[in-house]
Every structure is written in structure tokens, then in C-alpha cells.
Image: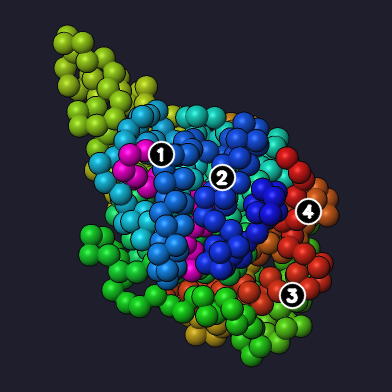
Amino acid sequence: MTDNTIIKLTAAEIAGKIAAGELTAVEVTEAHLARIEAVDEKVHAFLHVDRDGALAQARAVDEKRARGEKLGPLAGVPLALKDIFTTVGIPTTVGSKMLEGWIPPYDATLVKNLKAADVVILGKTNMDEFAMGSSTENSAYGPTGNPWDLTRIPGGSGGGSSAALAAYEAPLAIGTDTGGSIRQPAAVTGTVGVKPTYGAVSRYGMVAFSSSLDQGGPCARTVLDAALLHEAIAGHDPLDSTSIDAPVPPVVEAARNGSVAGMRVGVVKQFRGEGYQAGVVQRFDESVELLKSLGAEIVELDCPTFDLALSAYYLIAPSECSSNLARFDAMRYGLRVGDDGTRSAEDVTALTREAGFGDEVKRRIILGTYALSSGYYDAYYGSAQKVRTLITREFEKAFEEVDVIVSPTTPTTAFPIGERADDPMAMYLADLCTIPTNLAGNAAMSLPCGLAPEDGLPVGLQIIAPAMKDDRLYKVGAAVEAAFVEKWGHPLLEEAPSL
């Protein structure tokens, strides 16, 4: 089997062939490392490739199989890891100069779970600095290109992970989702991304941006692959005080038995209108008709508080980031500037933050500090939290009527790199459809639903489910995916331009 054939396999197919002895984990890893070497100079999906570590993990899988030990569902499958999770022995930069070259002394719980599942970690992927952005243009190490069109963004903040999937550099990836940073990159690269229920995947060892919103999750090219990865990383963690102590929903079973027959699917009228690209709306409407043809009942929903979600989010998230990033004081770890023996600790801290943080991070710290300041807390942060409660109640009310909600994932397809760099408000609107779910803590998925006719770029369909009903995402997602594959005869990603 050639390298080009290997990299086009799904994660489930790779694991099956390794277990059956048709491929070795080393062969699979070498094929993906060769692909990274061949194309990543153009894509820039990776910040660090751990070649030696990945091959060592692969050899361990092959040795385990040689001993006759039972292999897990993802044993030997390569993965690209967003550079926001701490990893022993290799750098964790969070896309920032503040942590350039920092090598953590411990693994994040998610990383431990991946290693326990014998997943092969290829390296760390590029991202917006401290996960603050919607395009991966805010990385201190340069932007990532979208494999469909390298002049366009791959989404953000997890654009490196989504680009690695779309470029066939890895069959699996990990992202984090604070306001849409798994789903939005998935939508614009034609891949699958899932934001699990808040607290379903441990945040221990994930560098914090906005602690009440951040959530790690799986990224893949198929719904089943995402489900297998979801099952591997999820579960209760006593090291994370927000971790849910409950069984992981049967996501793999749901992905293998996708169906929408008899389900009530909600369509929210607030998720369309001004600012939505015509091709995105067209593909979404076609997806709704497809769901109807598969046996779902479509229910129109009116959720007026969703229009307030963007404003509430951009008060809550910056407020929490201003608190979390206060730990980067040049005293304990990371960058230190100006410590020449003549300056005070305050001066060193100020110089370090000036040099270490990028413009978007500084913008959000300033906004958050202002919103939390005396005299403004109740007017801004307090009011935003009240809106958050209203949005959560709106979701609860909606889920009394429907099983899942669907919407476009993003209002537009991938925009050109640099187009919105000087317009923060235009950039923030990229997460218009995804933010309400983060505020409520629900589960959500994005999967491909076709290409926009005006530019030939991928469009994402978002599926939203109640908290701890993540299996519904996979049940609906698998049914939609199967219908698209049957219609076109191959996965949508096969249409992506060759690198």
C-alpha cells in the first residue's frame, strides 16, 4: 500500500488494518510524516512535529500487537494536537511568544487519555494566540492556509488542526472550542468537528482562555472517526473541578447507526438573514430538505435572545481571559524581558507582556479588565451573565419541542487571509452561529453539507444537542453524512484541491 493510499484512509480503516496485520503502525506514521514534510511548508498546520516521539509510540503499538495483546479502536492512528494542551517533552506555545520554547513537566489529562488509547501524536498544531481568534491569523508564528485555497483562512482558533485534516497530514486532530473554534474551522475546511458538552472532556492541562466556556473536542474527516476519538478522550477527571461525573454517552454506537427517522429537528429563525452568504443559506436549506426526506420532522423555532449572544460572549470571554492571563507575569515561567537588575518587578512584567502578547490578546485583556473594573462590573459582566442565563433557558425551552437544532455553522465560507485583520467586529461575526452553544454548555457538531456555488468552498451544517446528549449529534450527523456520500458517491473532502 502506497503512502498516498494510506493517508486517504479513515482512522477506523487504519486501526482495522493495523489490528489485522495488513499495516504496521510505523508504516502509517511514516506515511503521514512524509506527507507533513511534503506539504506543510505551504500549509503551515504544524508548529512542532515530534518525529522521534511519534515513531516510538508507533513501534510500541506494533510490539503490543506482536505480543498478541488486544488493541484499542484507535491504536496506531496518527493525530495532530492543538498546541494548547501540555505535553511532556515537547513544546506547548499556545501560538504565543509568551510561551515560546516552553516544555511542560506534565501531560494534560486529554493527552494521557490519547496515549492510553495508543493514539500516535504527530505533533502540535498552529492556532490563534491563546485561542483568541477566528482565522489562525493571530498566531505569533504566522498564519495557516486552508488546503482548499491556501490564500484563505482555515478557520480559528484551531485552524492548524482543521488544515492538517484537510491536507491529509493526519486522519485525526484535537481542537478546543470557546466560541466555535472546533466547529468553525471544520466548516470552512470541509471536515467534522465536535464541541462536546461542557465538562465532558477534562480541561486539566489545557491552557485557559475563558474557563467557563473552553472545551476540548475531536476533529476528523468522518463522523465515525470523530465518535471514536470522542470516546477515547471523554470521561470524568477528578483533577478538573468542572468535569462531569457521568458515563460517556454512546457516541460510537450512534455514529454506526445514524438515523433521523421520527426525530424532531429545530430550525432557529435567528440563524439566517443579513450577513449570511447566499451559497451558505442555499446549502443549509438543502440540508433541511434532506433531513425531511430522511424522516425528520422540521420545527421552526424563535429564539430572540440568541441575537444577544455575540455581545454577551465578548464581555464574558475577555473578562475571564483577563483574569487567566494575569498569571503570565515573567516571574514563574515563560518569556522574561528587561530583567537586567535595574528594573522593578512591575517594569519587567510590563515589558514582558508588551513583548509576549499579540494585539488581539492585548485587546481582549483590556476589554475584560474594563468590564470587571469597579463601577462597571454589574453594568457589563453582570448583565452579560444574565443574558447567558436567558440563552440557556431559551435552549431548554427549545429542547422541550425538538431533539436537535440545526443551523449553518458559519455565515460565510473561508475568507481571504488579511481581509478582516483590521476589522475585529467583522472577524467576531464568524462565530455568530456557534457562540450560543458555548454560553449554554450544550453539545454541537459541524459537518460538511456541500460547496457554496459562488466560490466552490465548503459549507458546514451545525447540529446542536442538549447537554450530555452528545450521541444525538452522531446519530443525526452519521445519517446526513451517509446521505451525502450516497448522493455524490464519495466524501466531500475528495474534492479538495491537491497540494
Looking at the image, tell me whether mark 3 or mark 4 is earlier in sequence order: 3
Marks 3 and 4 close (CB-CB < 8 Å): no
Residue shown at 25% from the left, 41% from the top: 105
Circle 2 — which element? helix
User: Which residue range is magenta in the image?
Assistant: 72-90
Distance from Cα at disc 4 to Cα at disc 1: 31 Å
296 left or right of 121? right
Looking at the image, tell me whether mark 3 or mark 2 is earlier in sequence order: 2
Residue type for callout 2:
Glu
Quarter of the rendering occupied by the C terminus: top right
Q: Which residue is mark 2?
A: 30
129 left or right of 414? left
Q: Which residue is mark 4?
A: 495
Residue type for callout 3:
Ala
Q: Outermost residue toward the front? A: 67
Q: Nearer the viewer, mark 3 or mark 2?
A: 2
Residue type for callout 4:
Glu
Distance from Cα at disc 3 to Cα at disc 2: 34 Å
Looking at the image, tell me whether mark 2 or mark 4 is earlier in sequence order: 2
Q: Which residue is mark 1?
A: 94
Q: Which residue is mark 3?
A: 483
